[in-house]
Amino acid sequence: MPAYRVAWQQPAQVIATVTVDLDELAQWAVDSGGVRALASGDPVAADLPGLRRLLERNQHFREELLRRWAIDHLPHS
């Protein structure tokens, strides 16, 4: 009997509940190089207290960093 190879793409939604302190999240973002700031037009390490405030005030930014943190920390199969 012949074998047939098929391939397709399909979207996937991943939902994860993560427990991480915003201070820890901010420190991880700075340490991983995932967040940079501009100083006189040049990228520099982000200011930790400023990043922490941004995480508190900007839901979209916080959710994006949480997604990146989860991808980096959760087991992959």
Image: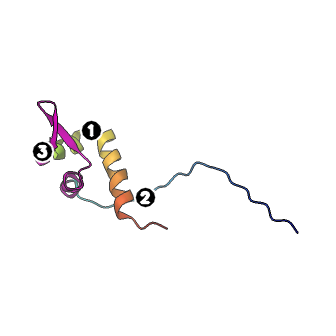
Q: Amino acid at mark 2?
A: Ala
Name the residue that disc number 2 marks: 16
- Point 33% across, 39% down: residue: 60
- Asked if labels 3 and 1 touch by Cβ distance under 8 angstroms, the answer is no
Which of the pair 5/53 is nearer the observer? 5
Using the image, determine if residue 77 lies above or below residue 56. Answer: below
Magenta stretch? Answer: 23-50
- Point 29% across, 45% down: residue: 62
The magenta stretch spans residue 33: yes
- Point 23% across, 51% down: residue: 33
Q: Amino acid at mark 3?
A: Asp
Label 1 sits on a secondary structure element that is: loop
Name the residue that disc number 3 marks: 47
Name the residue that disc number 1 marks: 58
Q: Amino acid at mark 1?
A: Asn
Extreme residue toward the top, this view: 40
- Point 17% across, 44% down: residue: 51
Of the numbered discs 2 and 1, the one sitting upstream in the chain is 2
Q: Position of residue 42 (x, y in %)?
A: 15, 35
Which of the pair 30/66 is nearer the observer? 30
The magenta stretch spans residue 68: no
